[in-house]
Image (cartoon, rainbow, N blue to C red):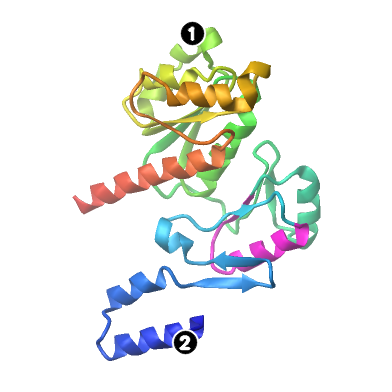
Amino acid sequence: MNQAEALRGLLKAVAQGEVSPEGAFTQLKNLDFEPIADFAKVDHHRAIRTGFPEVVWGPGKTVDQIVQIMERLRLRNSVVMATRITPEVYAQLRIALPTLIYDEMACICALVPDPVVPQYPGTIAILTAGTADLPVAQEAAVTAELSGFRVRRLWDVGVAGIHRLLSHRQVIDEAEVLIVVAGMEGALPSVVAGLANCPVIAVPTSVGYGASFNGLAALLTMLNSCAAGIGVVNIDNGFGAAILAGQILRTAAKLKNAG
């Protein structure tokens, strides 16, 4: 059964009272995707299911493929985002998509018809251990902002100079979710989690000397933290950390509204 036949069958079942409107909505959440040539199937209903629309992963795709996917996505989404886009690829994309905006540090480009304003309550605070961790942290920050969340940044407050972190204790105290980005030995999330009364999402980066094993040492430190309340995402995964933080805030808002 193709998509059109499935839709007709579902609508007929609703009309005949065999399926409730709410039941039909549940089925439709898992139905709508659109093939693009022979290289992609764009998931238009991901935002309905998860609260976040599909995002384009840039590496491994041609410029033409990225353009076609973004053009289809923007027909149904107010914000369309592509990650891990190099400046060279962005220069080519902008020829076909002249309104495309770009954050070079985050390597994120986006189609944004209007200024993005926070849609959800709460603040995501993003901390880095060092300046070298900024690209991953900025990926998290831009992802969160484009997704409608309020972000506060605090850079270069690692454990090598712990007084820098402690002098900004209010950032930790005022956040609803913390994303802590660190390379080297990855100790900063443990310190922050020992001070925070909110969820802490740790992001290991591939920054460090040889024995850091491209972020593996930081990852293991974060996974073995003795401070409770830390969730750990993959190495250099600022994007994933932002989505997790957003899900936490959205769930909290939903529970508050339900109460």
Query: 152 or 80, which lies in front?
Result: 80
> Residue 29: percent from the left, percent from the top?
41, 68
For mark 2, what is the residue? 5
Residue range in magenta is 62-82
Can residue 105 be spotted in the picture? yes
Taking 116 as reference, is 153 above or below it?
A: above
> Residue 105: percent from the left, percent from the top?
68, 36
Q: What residue appears at the point 75 percent right and 58 percent down from the top-left corner?
A: 98
Query: 15 or 163, which lies in front?
Result: 15
Q: CA distance from mark 1 to mark 2?
A: 64 Å
Q: What residue appears at the point 54 percent right and 68 percent down from the top-left corner?
A: 76
Taking 37 as reference, is 145 above or below it?
A: above
List the single residue furthest toward the left. Answer: 259
Q: Is residue 29 left or right of residue 13?
A: right
**In magenta stretch: residue 79:** yes
Amino acid type of the residue tagged 1 in the rendering: His
Amino acid type of the residue tagged 2 in the rendering: Glu
Q: What residue appears at the point 75 percent right and 44 percent down from the top-left corner?
A: 86
Task: Give whichever of discs 1 and 2 has the lower sequence position.
Answer: 2
Q: Which mark is residue 163?
A: 1
> Residue 54: percent from the left, percent from the top?
54, 58
Within 10 angstroms of label 1, few (less than 14), some, or many (20 or more) residues?
A: few
